[in-house]
């Protein structure tokens, strides 16, 4: 048999594939490689270290409260996800399924909020945080992170909530279910793929958030990991401990990758099958 | 008992009147079918009774209680939706038990009710499955089961058979009739656009007319027993809607009229109709109607030529070119021996004719002649 003729499209695919892979994976591979290098090896031209050393990983935890920082990040990102999902599920029901005047304007306003650059609202938000007495507290971060996660989660969930058949809600209504039961017992299970996807993205956004975290916290014990990493300093002001920074970065990235791998399946599975006639 | 009474019910969407001046009483235990062409508001009327839509005006009483402001779950009604609307993430058992849990019933009572409903609907083996793993007919039965377990005073069906294939539809129709007999005291309100369903199931048919509100007349064109609507349509709209294929209509001119009969001229033929025509003047225009199955073929003095044939096996429908009117006259033939181009003799018996006045209102047919019809 003759070999299958390679079409131009196939050719482009195989040429572009390594390019895209290299572009997206190289920085991460570089970080991993650097995190295992010691001393002057960091500045050698070899990609992989000649001597593998975990000393950087130990140092990250020894030289600053990095464990505490990780916990802070988990608390902040987890809190942000929980709060923004609860609020946006309720909001999505109102915006997606209840007819009221000014709904379109409200939707646009919500979207508009997310359009301001973080820096623009930073000083105003700082005033607000101090007035609430939340400065140098994790609550300040949870609250301010909601500003950019909420518009996104609300919009996505509204879109999905609109797609759900109206008769399903009416059937629940006839069965005596209240609004909260409809949202959390009927819609939430059906929206699960959308909820998983949006929570994941909200989690990542909150996990990586830097500017608010830098501005609203002061003490090392209240910092989240992005700030902690940026503030890792060496023995003198002339030395930047690249090894430690890279090790910390790898540690921070791994949970995200694990989360994506776990939720990948949830996102793909379509649960609405069989809701209405098939 | 559970009587449903609608008094002067109106419904507008935006500025458009959908339902106008609905006055209707559905007796306890009655099987009432709402029927009408699409856009007549029959589903809207059902949703008003369910409480899923609010009336723009008028009062709705169930069991003597005004329920205008009572939420759906407290009206003692249960609904079977067109799309079934089963909860896809719950098992069949949970689908049926969901409403009962909200009624704060005991676990044993819920179990007992679900089991007995499943038993009567042959769903016992499927209780642990999810709707996605069921066939269309099975989903339909679960939807009915979900209504039964609530033991409501009123069952509401919104075109429940329209998603089933033809053979299953007939089976389920019989099943629903059986269910109605079995449940006895509960009233059923059933929406359909299929007149076979309406004729076979209903104790009472409510025929709704679209756009009635814009014409300033009540939405209900006629209410009555299925055979009443078939034999005594009140006006031309009812006459043309009930029956398949539809009634033949042709224009005619009154030549003699009295309370015991009417003589008129249609095209080249002179026709006698057994209707009470008192008040009609000679020379006025009327519309004469006759159902295809009532044309007597093979006798009489009228002649027609077959231009088109529809064979249905046991009988066929022939489209005749006649001197009565430019439109073809549809007649029912026994067997299927006729051929296109054949000439047929036929008669239009006086007792089978319907006559409609200039306003399309039917003249009352003479009861004495109906036995023959």
Image (tube, grey):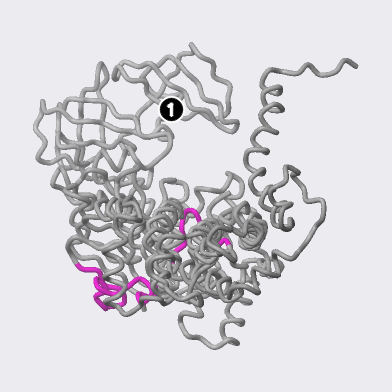
| Subunit that carries the residue with mark 1 | B
Residue B61 on the magenta segment = yes
- The local crowd at label 1, few if under 14, some if 14 to 19, many if 20 or more residues have their Cα within 10 Å, is many
Percent position (x, y) of residue B234? 24, 46
Q: Is residue B371 above or below residue A87?
A: above
Whether residue A256 is visible, yes or no, is no
Quarter of the image for the C terminus of chain B: give it: top left
Residue appearing at x 38%, y 62% in the figure: A93
For the point 43% across and 21% down, the residue is: B319
What secondary structure is found at the residue carrying circle 1?
Answer: strand
* Residue A253 rendering spot, x and y as whole percentages: 62, 58
Question: Can see residue B250?
Answer: yes
Identify the image quadrant of residue A26.
top right
Where on the picture, by quarter, is residue B302?
top left
Residue bounds of the magenta highlight: B59-88
Q: Residue furthest top?
A: B341
Where does label 1 land, which residue? B331
Q: Foreground: B104 or A233?
A: A233
Q: Is residue A212 left or right of residue A267?
A: left
> Which residue extends farthest right?
A1
Q: Position of residue A125 (x, y in %)?
A: 30, 66
């Amino acid at each position: 048999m003759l070999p299958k003729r390679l079409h131009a499209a196939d050719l482009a695919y195989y040429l572009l594939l390594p390019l895209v892979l290299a572009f997206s994976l190289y920085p991460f591979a570089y970080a991993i490689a650097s995190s295992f290098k010691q001393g002057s090896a960091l500045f050698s031209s070899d990609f992989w270290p000649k001597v593998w050393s975990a000393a950087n990983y130990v140092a990250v935890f020894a030289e600053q409260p990095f464990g505490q920082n990780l916990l802070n990040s988990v608390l902040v990102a987890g809190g942000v996800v929980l709060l923004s999902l609860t609020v946006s599920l309720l909001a999505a029901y109102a915006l997606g399924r209840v007819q009221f005047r000014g709904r379109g304007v409200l939707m646009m306003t919500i979207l508009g909020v997310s359009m301001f650059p973080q820096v623009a609202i930073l000083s105003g938000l700082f005033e607000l945080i101090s007035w609430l007495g939340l400065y140098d507290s994790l609550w300040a971060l949870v609250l301010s992170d909601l500003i950019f996660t909420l518009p996104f989660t609300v919009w996505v969930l509204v879109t999905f909530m609109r797609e759900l058949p109206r008769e399903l809600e009416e059937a629940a209504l006839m069965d005596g279910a209240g609004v909260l039961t409809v949202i959390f017992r009927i819609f939430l299970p059906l929206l699960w793929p959308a909820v998983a996807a949006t929570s994941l993205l909200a989690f990542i956004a909150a996990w990586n958030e830097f500017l608010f975290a830098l501005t609203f916290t002061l003490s090392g014990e209240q910092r989240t990991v992005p700030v902690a990493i940026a503030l890792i300093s060496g023995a003198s002001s002339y030395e930047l401990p690249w090894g430690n920074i890279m090790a910390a970065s790898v540690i921070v990235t791994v949970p995200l990758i694990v989360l994506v791998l776990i939720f990948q399946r949830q996102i793909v599975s379509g649960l609405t099958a069989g809701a209405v006639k098939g | 008992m559970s009587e449903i009474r609608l008094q002067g019910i109106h419904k507008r969407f935006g500025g458009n009147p959908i339902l106008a001046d609905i006055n209707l009483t559905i007796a306890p235990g009655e099987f009432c079918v709402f029927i009408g062409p699409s856009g007549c508001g029959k589903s809207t009327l059902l949703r008003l009774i369910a409480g899923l839509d609010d009336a723009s005006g008028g009062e709705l009483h169930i069991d003597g209680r005004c329920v205008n402001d009572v939420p759906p779950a407290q009206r003692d009604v249960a609904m079977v939706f067109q799309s079934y609307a089963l909860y896809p993430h719950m098992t069949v058992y949970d689908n049926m038990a969901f409403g009962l849990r909200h009624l704060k019933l005991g676990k044993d009572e819920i179990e007992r009710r679900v089991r007995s409903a499943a038993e009567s609907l042959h769903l016992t083996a499927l209780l642990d499955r999810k709707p996605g793993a069921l066939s269309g007919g099975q989903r339909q039965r679960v939807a009915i089961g979900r209504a039964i377990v609530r033991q409501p005073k009123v069952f509401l069906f919104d075109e429940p058979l329209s998603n089933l294939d033809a053979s299953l539809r007939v089976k389920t129709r019989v099943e629903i009739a059986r269910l109605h007999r079995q449940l006895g005291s509960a009233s059923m309100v059933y929406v359909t656009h299929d007149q076979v369903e309406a004729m076979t199931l209903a104790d009472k048919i409510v025929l709704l007319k679209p756009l009635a509100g814009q014409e300033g007349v009540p939405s209900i064109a006629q209410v009555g027993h299925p055979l009443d609507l078939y034999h005594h349509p009140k006006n031309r709209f009812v006459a043309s809607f009930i029956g398949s294929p539809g009634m033949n209509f042709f224009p005619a001119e009154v030549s003699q009229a009295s309370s015991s009969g009417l003589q008129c001229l249609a095209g080249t033929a002179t026709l006698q109709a057994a209707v009470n025509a008192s008040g009609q003047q000679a020379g006025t225009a009327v519309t004469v109607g006759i159902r295809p199955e009532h044309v007597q073929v093979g006798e009489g003095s009228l002649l027609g030529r077959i231009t088109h044939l529809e064979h249905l096996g046991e009988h066929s429908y022939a489209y005749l070119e006649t001197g009565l009117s430019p439109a073809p006259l549809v007649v029912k033939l026994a067997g299927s021996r006729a051929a296109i181009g054949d000439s047929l003799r036929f008669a239009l018996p006086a007792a089978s004719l319907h006559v409609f006045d200039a306003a399309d209102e039917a003249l009352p047919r003479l009861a004495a002649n109906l036995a023959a019809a």
